[in-house]
Image: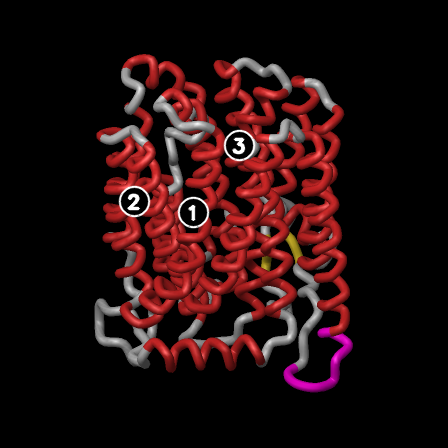
Amino acid sequence: MSTESLLPPAARRVIRLNNAFQLSFNLLWWMPVFYDYQRRSGLGDAEIFRIQSLYYLAFCFLEVPTGLVADRVGARRCLRLGAAVMIVANVLPAVRPDHTGFLVHFLLLAAARSLVSGAGSAYLYEALDGHGARERYAQAEGTARALGLAAKIVCWPFVGLVSAVATSAPYWLTALSAGVSLVCVLALPPLPHPGAPGGKDPVNREGPFAVLRGAARVFAGSRALGPLMLQGVAVFTLARICQVNLFQPLLIDKDVPVADHGLVLSAMTLAEAVAAARPGLVRRRMGDSAAVFSLTVVMAGALAAAAWANGAVTAVLLCLFAAAAGFCYPVQRQLINGAIPATPYRATLLSVESIVDRGVCALAALATGAYLGAGRIDSLLVHAALATCALLTTVAAALAWARRGTRGPQVPKDPASQESSGGQTVPSSNPRA
C-alpha cells in the first residue's frame, strides 16, 4: 500500500492539485531556446544578461510585497493572481519580440513567480499541517517538482520542431500551460482552520508594517533561520545561474550544436526529476543540513570540472549537477519551513528568503555577462564553485554556533528522520531543524 493512500482524502486532494499546479505553472516551453530566440531578435549578450539581472532585481522589490499580500489576503488568492499574470507575461514576447517586449516579459515573469513562490510553499505546508500530514511536506514538494520536471523532459525535445513551425510558438504554449495552472489553483480547497468561515482561508488583517515587524520578531527569535536562508542562497544561485543563464553559452563554448541543446536539457531534467522524487534516499543517510551541504559541494565540483571538459563530458557533469540539485531542493525547503514556528507571517518570511536569493542572482547574472564578454567562461565556472564552498563553510560554522548557543530559543538538530524502504519520509519524533 502506498504511503499516499494512508493520508486523509483532503490531504491527498491538496497534494494532487498542487502537483498539477506546479507542473503547468513551471512548464516554460521557451526555456531551451530563449537565448537563441533573443539573439535572433537582435539582442546582444550584454542586453540579454542585463535583462536577466533586472529580472532578479525585480524579484528583490516584489518578493516581500507579494509575501505581505499572501499573508493578508490568503495564499490561494495570491496563487490565482500569480497564474493570471503568468499568462500575460508569456503572450507578450510572442507579439512583441524586441528589447522592450523581452524586458516587460521578464518583469511580469518576476511578478508572477514572486506571487507564487512564498504563497505556494506556505499553502502546501499549512494545508498538510492542518490535515495532520506535516511530515509529508518534503516528499510532496519533491514529488511536485519531479512531475514538473518530467513534463519538461517530454516537452522540451520537441521545442525545436515547434519553433520551426512558428518561432513564437513556445511562448504561446507556455501561456496555455499557465492557463491550466489557473484552473488548478481555482480548485484548491481553503486551508483548514477552526476559526475561519467556511470556504475561506485564514488571513492576517494586520497592516503591512505590523506584518513586517511581526516577521522580523520571528526571524530574530530563530538563530537557525538566517544561516539556513544563506544556505538556500548557495543552492538556488548556483542552480539558477547554471541551468538558466549559463547553460546555453556553456554548451556553445564546448561546440555542442544548438539542435542538441534541448536533448541535453531534457537529460539534465530527467536526472533532476528522478532525484527530486526521492529526497528520502539522502535524508535517511544523513541529517538535512549535512545533506544540503554535501549536495551543494557536489554541484560546485561538477561546475568547476566542466572548465576542463569537452562537450560530451560537460553534458554528463551537467546531469550530475542537476541530480544533486534535485535531491537538494525539497530538503532545503523542509529545513526552512521547519525553522519557522507556527506564525501568520510564514509567507512573508519565505519571501525574505527569495528576495535574498534573487538579489544574489542579479549580481551573479551581471558577473556572468562580464565573464562571457571577456571570453573567460572557464574562470567563471571555477570562481563560482569556490565562492559557493566559501559560503557553505560560513553557513556550517553559523549553524554549529547556533546549536551550541545557550541564549534564546533552542535550535534543534536535524531530525533523525526514519524512511520507508521506498525512500519516503515517515514521521520523526523531532520534525524541526
The answer to whether one can see residue 8 in this image is: no
For the C terminus, give its image quadrant. Answer: bottom right
Q: First in sequence: mark 3 or mark 2?
A: 2
Is 269 positioned to the left or the right of 253 in the image?
Answer: left
The percent coordinates of residue 309 (x first, y second) are: 73, 23
Is 372 positioned to the left or the right of 29 in the image?
Answer: right
**Which numbered mark, 1 or 3, is in the foreground of this view?**
1
Q: Which residues are magenta?
A: 402-409
**Which numbered mark, 3 or 2, is in the foreground of this view?**
2
Specify the amino acid type for callout 2. Met
The prevailing secondary structure element of the residues shown in magenta is loop
Q: Which residue is mark 3?
A: 269
Q: What residue is rendered at 57% in x and 20% in y?
A: 252
Q: Which residue is mark 2?
A: 86
Name the element at disc 1: helix
Name the element at disc 2: helix
